[in-house]
C-alpha cells in the first residue's frame, strides 16, 4: 500500500476529520484514532452492529481504536509520547483547544519537529469567526449552498440530506497532508496545515466565481445542475437528465424526433425558452412518458450524446453491475459481525486500497498499540487504566 510505514495520530471526531484520516488509512497509513472517555459523537448514531454505530464504522474503518483521557496530565503526556512516533497529526478541535489539551502544534513539534500537523476547523485558525462552532449544516447555510439551491429550485431554503462540506474538507485536508509529507521528504521540514470548512465550501462550489461576480445576469448557462430535469418513465422509474432544461431541451427534442413540438411554440433557440421552465418540464415529461423503461429512453437520448441517471437508493447500489465489478463495497468486520461499507474511490496500479481492518469499540486497541509502540508493560497499562487515563468500552 502506498502509505505503508506512515503513522497518523487522529484526534478527530464526527465526520470531517475522520473522513480525512479514513482516506489516509485506505492508502495504507497506520491510523491511531484517539477518542475521549465519552467517545466520538458518531458512536451515538444508529443503527448499530454489535454495539458499534454503522455511521461511525464507515468513517473509521481500518483504524486502531484508543481511548485516552486528555483532561488528565498523564493522558496528555501519553498522547505526546505517541505523537513523537507519528508522521502526521490530525485534529478538528476549535482553535486553541488542542493547545489546552497539551497536543497543540507547538507541543507536538517540540518532541517531533518533522511532524505534518493538520487542523480542520469551520473558519480557520485565525480571524473573527475562528472561535465559532461549525457543523456541515452551518457551513451549507452560511456559504451559499442553501440559498443557491433555493433559487435554482424555486423553493424556500431546504436542508441538505448529506454532509457535503465535511467530506469535501476531509478530501482537501488529506491532499494537503500528502503534499506536506512530500515537502518533508524533500526538505526534512515539518508542516503546520490549516484547512477550513468555509473556504472548502467556496472552493468546491463550481458557481462560486459566478455568484461572487454578479451572477449569470442576462446570459444563458447550459450548466445549471439545480434545474436538471427529473422525469418519470412509463414504468414509473424516475430518471434525471443533466443540464439546464431551457438549453438542453433542444438536444432532447432532436434525439426524440420532437423538434416540431418546439417550433410550434416558437422555440428555436435558448433565448426563446427562457422563463418557460414549467412548460418545458411538462413537455419533457410528456415525451418521457412515451418510453416504457430506462433502456429505451437512454438509447433514444444517446443519439444526441445526452446521458441520464436512474434515481436509485444507496441500498440498490450494492447490486449494481459496475459496483460489483469495481468491488466498490467491502464486507467490514464491525466488532465481530460483517457489514458492507464503501471501499475507497481510488485505485493504484501498485498496491491495494481500502480498509485493512474493521471498526471496534472505543479503546479496543489501547493495550496492544501502547505495548507495541511505546513498550509499556502490563503493569504500566494496568496503572493507566486504574487512574482513568486509559479507558475502554464494554459492549455486550
Image: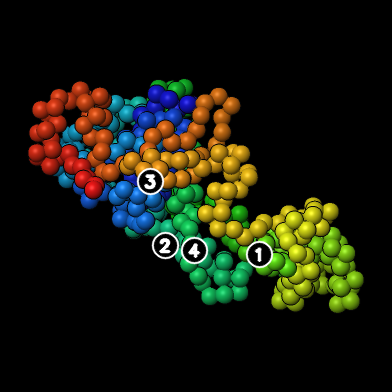
Residue 275, quarter of the rendered image:
bottom right
Front in this rendered view, residue 230 or 203: 230
- Residue drawn at x 42%, y 40% is 332
Which residue matches tag 2? 138
Residue 269 image offset from top left, x and y in percent: 84, 67
Instruction: Report the side of 47 relative to 264 (left or right).
Output: left
Cβ atoms under marks 4 and 2 closer than 8 Å: no
- Closer to the chain start, of discs 4 and 3, is 3
Q: Which mark is residue 57?
A: 3
Cβ atoms under marks 3 and 2 closer than 8 Å: no
Element class at badge 3: helix
- Dot 1 alpha-carbon crowd within 10 angstroms: few under 14, some 14 to 19, many 20 or more: some
Residue 333 image offset from top left, x and y in percent: 38, 40
- Closer to the chain start, of discs 1 and 2, is 2
Instruction: Report the side of 188 relative to 82 (left or right).
Output: right
* Label 3, label 1: how far apart the Cα atoms are: 31 Å
| Mark whose residue sits in front, 1 or 4 | 1
| Mark whose residue sits in front, 4 or 2 | 4
Instruction: Report the side of 307 relative to 18 (left or right).
Output: right
Which residue matches tag 4? 160
| Mark whose residue sits in front, 1 or 2 | 1
Cβ atoms under marks 1 and 2 closer than 8 Å: no
Which residue matches tag 1? 238
Element class at badge 2: helix
Residue 62 image offset from top left, x and y in percent: 39, 36
Residue 129 image offset from top left, x and y in percent: 37, 58
- Residue drawn at x 18%, y 42% is 391
Amino acid at each position: 500500500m502506498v502509505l505503508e510505514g506512515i503513522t497518523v495520530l487522529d484526534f478527530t471526531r464526527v465526520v470531517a476529520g475522520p473522513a480525512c484520516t479514513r482516506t489516509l488509512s485506505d492508502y495504507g497509513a497506520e491510523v491511531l484514532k484517539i477518542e475521549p472517555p465519552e467517545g466520538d459523537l458518531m458512536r451515538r448514531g444508529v443503527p448499530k452492529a454489535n454495539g458499534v454505530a454503522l455511521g461511525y464504522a464507515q468513517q473509521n474503518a481500518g483504524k486502531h481504536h484508543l481511548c485516552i483521557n486528555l483532561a488528565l496530565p498523564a493522558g496528555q503526556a501519553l498522547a505526546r509520547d505517541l505523537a513523537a512516533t507519528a508522521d502526521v497529526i490530525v485534529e478538528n478541535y476549535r482553535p486553541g483547544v488542542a493547545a489546552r489539551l497539551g497536543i497543540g502544534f507547538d507541543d507536538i513539534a517540540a518532541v517531533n519537529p518533522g511532524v505534518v500537523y493538520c487542523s480542520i476547523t469551520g473558519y480557520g485558525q485565525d480571524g473573527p469567526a475562528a472561535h465559532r462552532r461549525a457543523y456541515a449544516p452551518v457551513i451549507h447555510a452560511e456559504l451559499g449552498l442553501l440559498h443557491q439551491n433555493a433559487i435554482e429550485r424555486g423553493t424556500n431554503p431546504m436542508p441538505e440530506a448529506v454532509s457535503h462540506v465535511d467530506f469535501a474538507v476531509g478530501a482537501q485536508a488529506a491532499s494537503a497532508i500528502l503534499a506536506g509529507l512530500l515537502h518533508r521528504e524533500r526538505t526534512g521540514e515539518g508542516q503546520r496545515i490549516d484547512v477550513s470548512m468555509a473556504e472548502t465550501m467556496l472552493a468546491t462550489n463550481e458557481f462560486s466565481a459566478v455568484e461572487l461576480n454578479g451572477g449569470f445576469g442576462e446570459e444563458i448557462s447550459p450548466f445549471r445542475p439545480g434545474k436538471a430535469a427529473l422525469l418519470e418513465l412509463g414504468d414509473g422509474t424516475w430518471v434525471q437528465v443533466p443540464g439546464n432544461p431551457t438549453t438542453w431541451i433542444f438536444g432532447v427534442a432532436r434525439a426524440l424526433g420532437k423538434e416540431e413540438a418546439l417550433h410550434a411554440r416558437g422555440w428555436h433557440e435558448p433565448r426563446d425558452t427562457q422563463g418557460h421552465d414549467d412548460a418545458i418540464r411538462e413537455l419533457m415529461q410528456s415525451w418521457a412518458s412515451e418510453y416504457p423503461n430506462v433502456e429505451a429512453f437512454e438509447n433514444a437520448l444517446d443519439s444526441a450524446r445526452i446521458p441520464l441517471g436512474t434515481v436509485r437508493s444507496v441500498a440498490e447500489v450494492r447490486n449494481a453491475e459496475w459496483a460489483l465489478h469495481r468491488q466498490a463495497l467491502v464486507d467490514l468486520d464491525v466488532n465481530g459481525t460483517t457489514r458492507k461499507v464503501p471501499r475507497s474511490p481510488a485505485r493504484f496500479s501498485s498496491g491495494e486500497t481500502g480498509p485493512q481492518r474493521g471498526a471496534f469499540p472505543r479503546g479496543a486497541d489501547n493495550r496492544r498499540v501502547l505495548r507495541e509502540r511505546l513498550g509499556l508493560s502490563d503493569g504500566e497499562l494496568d496503572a493507566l487504566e486504574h487512574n482513568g487515563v486509559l479507558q475502554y468500552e464494554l459492549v455486550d
